[in-house]
Image (cartoon, helix red, strand yellow):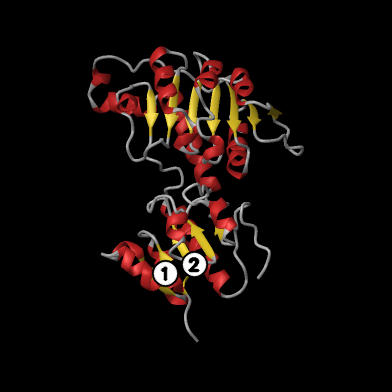
């Protein structure tokens, strides 16, 4: 029996490579010196693709060279690195890796929030530089009595809210629609949520629909005591508007794990002492990344075995063969 040909667009974790190699014939696009010639020869045989943000955006230009592809398995809960609408038009199923990273991202979000409010990285640097020998570290702001708004109350948003409940803070949210089974206060607009809160946690999907959802108006509504935490996608926040808001005191501070042009972070943000910057590590533990990688491979293997995908995205629902 012939083995199914699968294309991997960029290097992935050993668990993905090993699993796919056992079940399929795996082709590594990044190893090809002449990718155009390779795709012309092998492209028509490819039935599945394993991809991630490391490759960049997977669009029609690559799909044109893969006329018989049936499934694209993307690493990450966000999948704006794949043109899912174009895939749907061609009858291709797209999968992502939801669920397995929810707790890790939620944990990191709370850590980033506390680090931003209590200035934990700044305090660490203060001690290491010998400044404590000269004077105590300045007092910080606090999480006490704050009102927290969550932009995007999906699985991760709910996991964040559950953790926040243990801190005895007020919680509200904004999403595309109100959720009847959720007790938190709902605001139909992001500006309305920002006006009602002084911490805004962004955990909504990326893509064109949410580009610059957090703009100058939202930041102004958040106010001078406001703190922005972004663990979604960099494109959700208007980065230049945020820089200006932080410079002018329109908001108090920000904790960021994602940026518009990763891994390039604006020098203006790097130079600011009152923000906390992380290199997109919300799900970056060995445990969780292995679980994500396994799901990338399992989606393809399940498809190859005729069982259908495990986690198809809404734009490409699985309707059976």
The residue sitting at 57% across, 51% down in the picture is 85
Residue on which the image places disc 1: 43
From the image, which quarter does the C terminus lie in? Answer: bottom right
Tell me: residue 261, above or below residue 141. Answer: below
Residue topped by disc 2 = 67
The image position of residue 175, as x and y in percent, is 65, 34
Give the farthest residue toward the right: 180
Q: Secondary structure at mark 2?
A: loop
**SS under mark 1:** helix
The one nearer the camera, 202 or 164, is 202
**Percent position of residue 63, x then y:** 47, 60
Q: Quadrant of residue 178?
A: top right
Front residue of 124/263: it is 263
Q: Are marks 1 and 2 in contact (CB under 8 Å)?
A: yes
Q: CA distance from mark 1 to mark 2?
A: 7 Å
Q: Is residue 287 visible?
A: no
Q: Residue at x 46, y 66 (%)?
A: 66
With respect to residue 216, does 173 lie above or below?
Answer: below
Residue at image point 59% right, 26% down: 148
Location of residue 86 with respect to 36 vertically, above or below:
above
Q: Quadrant of residue 42?
A: bottom left
Q: Earlier in the sequence, mark 1 or mark 2?
A: 1
Q: Is residue 74 left or right of residue 35?
A: right
Residue 285 on image: x %, y %: 42, 50
């Amino acid at each position: 029996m012939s083995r199914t040909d699968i294309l991997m667009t960029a290097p992935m974790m050993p668990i993905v490579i090993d699993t796919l190699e056992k079940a399929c014939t795996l082709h590594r696009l990044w190893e090809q010196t002449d990718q155009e010639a390779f795709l012309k020869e092998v492209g028509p045989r490819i039935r599945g693709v394993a991809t991630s943000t490391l490759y960049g955006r997977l669009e029609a230009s690559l799909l044109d060279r893969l006329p018989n592809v049936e499934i694209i398995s993307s690493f990450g809960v966000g999948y704006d690195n794949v043109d899912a609408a174009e895939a749907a038009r061609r009858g291709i199923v797209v999968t992502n890796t939801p669920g397995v990273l929810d707790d890790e991202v939620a944990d990191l979000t709370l850590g980033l929030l506390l680090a931003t409010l209590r200035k934990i990285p700044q305090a660490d640097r203060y001690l290491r530089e010998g400044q404590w020998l000269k004077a105590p570290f300045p007092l910080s702001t606090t999480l006490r009595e704050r009102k927290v708004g969550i932009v995007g109350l999906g699985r991760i948003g709910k996991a964040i809210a559950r953790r926040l409940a243990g801190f005895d803070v007020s919680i509200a949210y904004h999403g595309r629609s109100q959720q009847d089974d959720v007790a938190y206060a709902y605001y139909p607009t992001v500006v309305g949520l920002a006006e009602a809160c002084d911490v805004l946690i962004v955990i909504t999907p990326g893509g064109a629909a949410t580009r610059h959802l957090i703009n100058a108006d939202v930041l102004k509504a958040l106010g001078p005591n406001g703190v922005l935490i972004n663990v979604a996608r960099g494109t959700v926040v208007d980065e230049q508007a945020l820089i200006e808001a932080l410079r002018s005191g329109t908001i108090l501070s920000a904790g960021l794990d994602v940026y518009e042009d990763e891994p390039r972070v604006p020098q203006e943000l790097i130079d600011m002492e009152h923000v906390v910057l992380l290199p997109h590590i919300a799900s970056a533990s060995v445990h969780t990344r292995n679980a994500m990688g396994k799901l990338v491979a399992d989606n393809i293997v399940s498809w190859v075995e005729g069982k259908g995908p495990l986690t198809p995205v809404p734009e490409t629902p699985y309707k059976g063969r």
